[in-house]
Image: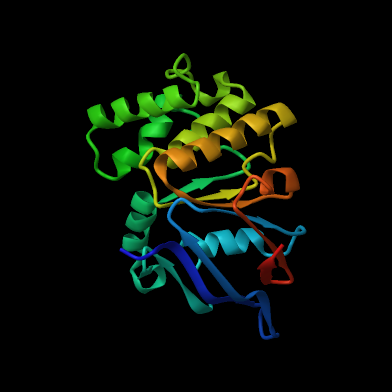
């Protein structure tokens, strides 16, 4: 087991646009997260924050450098294995909840466990327990359309943490919420991060939220630097 949950080592990302010059989005990114550590990344729109999260999460391959999860180079594996790694070791929270509309809160939260091969009975028990932790014990069988915006995001947070991942990657997780619900959501994320010893990388435009994290970085023109 590596000392670090997640590492980016000299990571660069470029996209080739036709026959022209490559568009460099990320340049020589270095980031090291211990287990349970929290990091905020702030930056202007178009600075590459989402591209960085996608690369850290193995959704996108770096053009140069490498991303290590528990010391393992994600990109060296097949796409099938990368999907398994993401399912077992990573959690994702987005600005929009991305809950499946035809399933209940309980079923949505159980989905990562079911995909990972956990029995329906155990998946349901664990999902009910974490939904209770996030204050949704009375909303287990409600579909997303029957939940408020804050409740939907709490369900999404529960889904990201149901399998106790090594690292959670959050892309503007409060960006679609009012101030009260945003405060509740970030408090919940921090509490679960501490309870589960899960590393957390959060991209946010809100400096108030960023200051809740143990470290803050700024990403500008593809370059990551301490804030």
In the image, residue 111 sits, relative to residue 18, either above or below, namely above
Residue placed at 57% from the left, 25% from the top?
A: 151
State the image coordinates of residue 170 (x, y, percent, origin top left). 57, 48
In the image, residue 155 sits, relative to residue 53, either above or below, namely above
Q: Of residues 75 and 227, which is closer to you in this image?
A: 227
Name the quarter where the C terminus is drawn.
bottom right
In the image, residue 189 sits, relative to residue 15, either above or below, namely above
Q: Is residue 99 visible?
A: no
Q: Is residue 159 visible?
A: yes
Q: Of residues 12 and 71, which is closer to you in this image?
A: 71
Q: Residue furthest right?
A: 44
Q: How many marks?
A: 0
Tell whether 117 sits left or right of 226.
left
When asked about the image quadrant of residue 133, the answer is: top left
Residue placed at 67% from the left, 64% from the top?
A: 48
Tell whether 33 sits left or right of 205.
left
Name the quarter where the N terminus is drawn.
bottom left
Q: Residue furthest top?
A: 138
State the image coordinates of residue 105 (x, y, percent, origin top left). 45, 26
State the image coordinates of residue 152 (x, y, percent, origin top left). 56, 29
State the image coordinates of residue 224 (x, y, percent, origin top left). 66, 69
Residue placed at 35% from the left, 65% from the top?
A: 2
Residue placed at 37% from the left, 24% from the top?
A: 128
The image's colouring method is: rainbow
In the image, residue 146 sits, relative to residue 40, either above or below, namely above
Q: Of residues 116 and 192, which is closer to you in this image?
A: 192
When asked about the image quadrant of residue 129, the answer is: top left
């Amino acid at each position: 087991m590596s000392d670090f949950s997640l590492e980016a080592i000299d990571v660069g990302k470029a996209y080739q646009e036709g026959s022209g010059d490559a568009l460099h989005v990320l340049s020589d990114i270095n980031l090291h997260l211990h287990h349970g550590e929290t990091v905020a990344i702030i930056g202007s729109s178009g600075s590459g924050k989402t591209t960085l999260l996608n690369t850290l999460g193995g959704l996108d391959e770096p053009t140069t450098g490498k991303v290590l999860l528990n010391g393992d180079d994600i990109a060296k594996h097949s796409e099938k294995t990368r999907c398994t790694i993401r399912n077992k070791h990573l959690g994702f929270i987005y600005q929009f909840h991305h809950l499946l509309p035809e399933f209940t809160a309980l079923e949505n939260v159980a989905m990562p466990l079911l995909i990972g091969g956990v029995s329906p009975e155990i998946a349901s028990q664990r999902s009910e327990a974490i939904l209770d932790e996030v204050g949704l014990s009375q909303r287990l069988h409600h579909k997303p359309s029957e939940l408020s915006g804050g409740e939907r995001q709490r369900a999404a947070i529960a889904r990201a943490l149901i399998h106790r991942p090594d690292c959670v990657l959050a892309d503007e997780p409060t960006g679609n919420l009012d101030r009260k619900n945003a405060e509740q959501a970030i408090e919940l994320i921090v509490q679960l991060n501490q309870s589960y010893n899960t590393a957390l990388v959060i991209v946010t435009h809100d400096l108030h939220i960023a200051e809740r994290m143990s470290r803050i970085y700024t990403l500008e023109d593809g370059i990551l630097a301490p804030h």
